[in-house]
Image (cartoon, rainbow, N blue to C red):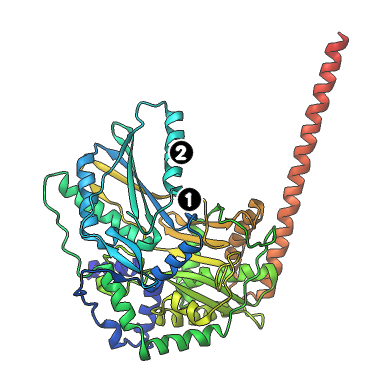
Amino acid sequence: MNSKKEEILHRQSQLSPAKKALLQQRLSGKFKIETHSLQSIPRRSSTGPAPVSFAQQRLWFLHQLDPDSVCYNIPVSVRLTGAIDAAALEQTFNEIVRRHEILRTTFKIVDGQPVQDIAPALAMTLPVVNLGKLPETARDREVQRLVTEECQQLFDLAAGPLMRSKLLQLGDREHLLLFVIHHIISDGWSAGVLIREIATLYNAFSQNQPSPLPELPIQYADFAIWQRQWLQGEILETQLAYWKQQLGSTPPILELPTDRPRSANQTTRSAKQLLALSPALTEALKTLSQQEGVTLFMTLLAAFKALLFRYKGQQDIVVGSPIANRNRAETEGLIGFLVNTLVLRTNLSGNPTFREILQRVRELCLGAYAHQDLPFEKLVQEMQPERNLGHPLLFPVWFVLQNSPVPALKLPGVTLTLSELDIGEARNDLKLDLTETPEGIKGFFEYKTDLFEAATIARMAELFQILLNRVVEQPGIPLNVLAETLAIAEKQQQLSKEKEFQEARRQKLGNIQRKAVTNSIQEIS
C-alpha cells in the first residue's frame, strides 16, 4: 500500500504546474472534462505539404521580419564520460530523424502562405572534432569558440536542415555532444524527448540491437492539421471569450526599471544573473503553497508580480508564461513546436495582502489553464496590438518554473550530463527562469543589456530573495508594507555598496601614497 502511495506521490511531483493545478481543481469537483478535449488526433491521409501550426506561422513571420536573429536557436549540450561509439551515435541521430518527420521539415511558400515541406528521407552526419591533443587551456578556449559558432549560426528555413549536431572529442573518454535546433520545429519539452530517445537508441545500437522504440502514433503535421480543424466554431468562440474578458481591449504595457530608454533599433543581446534559493527557503515556499491551497508556481509568480509592483507602483501587471500544451497522449512523445504562451494578467489594486495576491493568482492560473488551447498567435491576431520591433507584443516580461528535469540517463559504460547553452540573445526584455532541484530552487534573471545594467538586475535578484523570505514569515503582509520593506532593503544595499566603494578607494589612495613615499626615500638615498 505504501509503495503504491509513494508511486502516486512521485507521479504527482512530476506533473507540470498547470497539470498540478488542474488535478487539484478536478479533485475538488470544480473541473469539468470536455468530451471534445479527449478526442484523439487522427493521422493525415496526404503525404504532400502540410499546413503550418499557428505557432509556426507566427514564428515564420517573425523570421521574415528579422532573418539575422538567432534568438530562436535552441542549443543543448550533453557531456559524455566514457568510451563512445561515434558510429552508433550517428546511427541514433538518423533513426530519430526517420522517426520524427518534423526534423525533415523545411518551409516553403504556397499561395503566399508558409507550408511544411516534409522530405521523405534525410541522411544526417555527425561531424567529430578531435580536441584531445590540445593543452587544457587551449582546448577549453576552442570548445567555447566552437560552441559559440554553432549557437550563432543562422538557419535557412527554406533549405534546412533545421537541426545540426557536432561531437567534440575532449579526450579518450570525454566528449561533448552539441546540437542546435530552430524553435520552429522544437521546444523545451522536445529537447527532453530528444535526449531520452538518444539514450534509448544508443543503448540498443551500441550493442547491435534493433530499435526498441514503438512507432509514433502521430506526426507533428498531423497535430497542425488537427489544430486548425478543431479550433473553430463554438470551441474557438469559448476560448476567445475567456481571453477577451481577461485581457480587455489591450492590456497595459508593464513599466520596468530600465537604465536606458527603449528604442526601435535595440538589439536582443542579453546576459544572465544567477539565482539560488536555499533548501530551507524552498521548503518554506512549498509549505506556504500547501497551506494556501496553491501550487509552487502560483506562489513564485505572485511573489514576482509583487516585486514588479515595487518598482513603478503599477497595479495592473501582465506577465507571459509558457505552458507545454501536451495535454493529449499522442503529443507527449512528439518533437515539435507545441508550447503555448499564457498571458497572465493580475490586478493588485486595493493594497491586498500577499495571501490575497496568492488567491487572485490562483484563480487567474486556473482559468488560464482551463483555456490553454487557444494559441497565443490566435490571441495576438484577435487583439491586434500595435507591432513595434522595440517592444514585445502584449508583455515584456516572462516567468518560467520548470519542475520536470530530464531524469538521469544510463548508457552502457557512459555517463550523461545535460546542460543548456546561452546564446546571448533574449526574446523578452526580462525573464525569471526557475527550476526545482534537489538542492533547492535555482535559476536566473535574463535581461536585455540594451535596457538594463548588470548591477540593476543583481539588486533585483537580491530583493526577490528578501521578498520571498518575508512572505513565508508573514503571508498576511499588505502589499504597500512589502513594497516599503523592499525599498528600505534596496537603500541599505546601495549604502553598503557605496561604503565598500569608498573603502576600496581609500585603500587604493593609501597604496599610491605609500608607494610615492617609498620612491621618494629611494631617490634621496
- Picture quarter with the C terminus: top right
Side (left or right) of 135 relative to 302:
left
Q: Position of residue 498 (x, y in %)?
A: 76, 48
Quarter-of-image position of residue 184: bottom left
Disc 1 on helix, strand or loop? loop
Q: Position of residue 364 (x, y in %)?
A: 50, 81
Disc 1 residue type (three-letter):
Ile
Mark 1 neighbour class, 10 Å CA radius: few under 14, some 14 to 19, many 20 or more:
many
Position of residue 362 relative to residue 145, above or below, is below
The answer to whether residue 472 is visible is no
Q: Of residues 122 and 213, which is closer to you in this image?
A: 122
Disc 2 on helix, strand or loop? helix
Task: Tell me which residue sits at (69%, 73%) in the image.
Answer: 313
Q: Of residues 230 and 324, which is closer to you in this image?
A: 230
What number is the disc on residue 291? none
What number is the disc on residue 423? 1
Instruction: Residue under label 2, please give it.
Output: 145
Mark 2 neighbour class, 10 Å CA radius: few under 14, some 14 to 19, many 20 or more:
few
